[in-house]
Amino acid sequence: MATFFGEVVVAPSRAGVDEEEEAREETPEDREIRRELEKKREIDVLWTLKSGASTESSADEPFVCSKFIVAIGHNAAAFLSSFILDSVCWEVVGVVRLWNEWCRTSNTTNVLPTDSFCLFYRLISDPTVLLCQCSCYVAEDQQFQWLEKVFGRMRKEDLQVTILSTCPVADYKTQESTLTLPSPFLKALKTKEFKEQVCCPLLEQPNIVQDLPAAVLSYCQVWQIPAVLYQCYTDVIKLDTVTIEAFKPLLSSKILKSLVKDVSESTKILKKLLTTNETHNNIYI
Amino acid sequence: RWITCAVSVGNVGQLAIDLVISTLDMTKVGYFYTDCLVPMVGNNPYATGEENSLELSINAEVYSLPSKKLVVLQIRSPFIKNKYRPFCQTLLSWVKSSKCARVVLLSSSHAYQRDDEQLLGTPLRYLLTPDLEKAVGGLIKELNWKEMEKVAAYPGINDTEKVLHIPGGGITKMLFTESCSEGVQMAVLLKFCSEGDNIPDAFALVNYLNEWLQLIKSEVTSIALL
């Protein structure tokens, strides 16, 4: 393809299949390598639920879950850490172990906010409330597994899912001038079954959401689970107070209202979260 | 009858499917839940007003129109690496189990890779699997359509050995060859095009489809061509 100025550029094709990949038959070696890689990229969800019986034996039995709140990305996870989670009311009940090109998680549950991790918590006073902080990168080929392994353990009756996530404001398509966009801002998407009030405007066409948040919401739409996704469009991708606070309107939503902890504590925790992050900020060239 | 698209150059197949769904006002009847496509969600792309704009759409959805015995699969995202083959297999086994009589695959191919023969005349091509050829071959002859030419496997060295080559066609070739060997009645309709504003290409491809299937009356077709 030639551009306006005459230079020839290779346009990225949406066609997908690589000519070579398509033409070449897979040799036994290729197959072996592919299998080994697939094995390595497999996701493990380790549940440590103490539902009467020992963890291992009750592993197949699905547990009752009424509210499932998933925070994807560092900012959404930090929002939960500062406004909802604390070690008195919540206990860790699961951890995801995964490996990919961007991220490898350890199976420890002692994590720093800057670490990459995916943890599940349960409200001690109401064990049907489950929360997930997923700040690690889940690759495209691992998202389906994540869904199957996480939702596979839950009873889908009377379940309601809330997803929090962030993405760059540059991904937001609008006819308005982007200068006037009050970033960060929230947009929501919901499944057909979700009938409650949504705390922010809904995402307009032709905007789309991708990756794990989209995977979770698609899953809920297909299996008719009421679910809502709150997507925060922000211009700071790193851990950042302004972005975290953009999620604040959700604290008055029906799902989160009863879970909010002491707000004066929240600000303190928020500050602590950010200072941990800042220790790595140097001004060397 | 069953129509689907390939994710191919310029998204022409997908645009054409969108045109079919919105023109015939088809209803969504289900999803193609698969681990082979990149996940995506958005609000109803066919929204006509406030009331239907908030329906969630996902990466692969099935629409139907019982009055015309038509089922359409729209694919809205690309494939995950190494998942083309499993996708084709799932798709074909679904086609077989759902007792679809015929499948039409809408696709496209890189215009810049055409050979001398393909540069002449219409940019639209078709392909029929042997089983469909037996059934509708005569009808297609009457339409005076051009079949997709095979190209030399080793150009300049050996011009007698010819192969099917659909550059930029995504899973088109794989799906077509598998259909041939598994006895699925499949037609591929495609257009040579380049990346850019591909809406006119989609119109051309749907008009081409309409010449054969007569989904809508032809005066509408001529308006679309204007």
Image (tube, coloured by chain):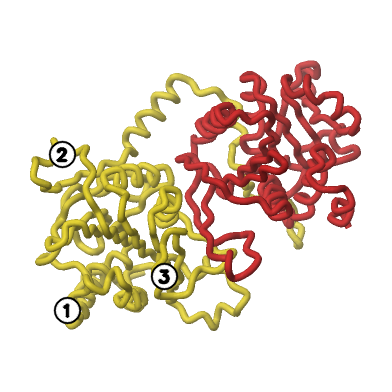
Chain colours: A yellow, B red
Q: Which residue is mark 3?
A: A232
Observer-side mark, 3 or 2, equals 2
Image position of B67 with respect to B226: above or below: above
Which residue is drawn at the image coordinates 36% and 62% (left, top)? A163
Quadrant that contains the N terminus of chain B: top right
Instruction: Please tell me the numbered disc located at residue B2.
Output: none
Inspect the image, locate mark 3, and give the three-letter code of the amino acid beneath it.
Answer: Cys
Q: Earlier in the sequence, mark 2 or mark 1?
A: 2
Q: Are marks 3 and 1 in one subunit?
A: yes
Relative side of A188 to B133, left or right: left
Relative side of A117 to A146, left or right: left
Inspect the image, locate mark 1, and give the three-letter code of the amino acid beneath it.
Answer: Asp
Q: In what element is the residue under mark 2?
A: loop
Q: Chain of mark 1?
A: A
Q: Can see residue A82?
A: no
Which residue is drawn at the image coordinates 42% and 52% (left, top)? A224
Q: Which residue is mark 1?
A: A262
Q: Earlier in the sequence, mark 3 or mark 2?
A: 2
Give whichever of A86, A9 is nearer the camera.
A86
Image position of B126 with respect to B20: above or below: above
Q: Which residue is mark 2?
A: A58
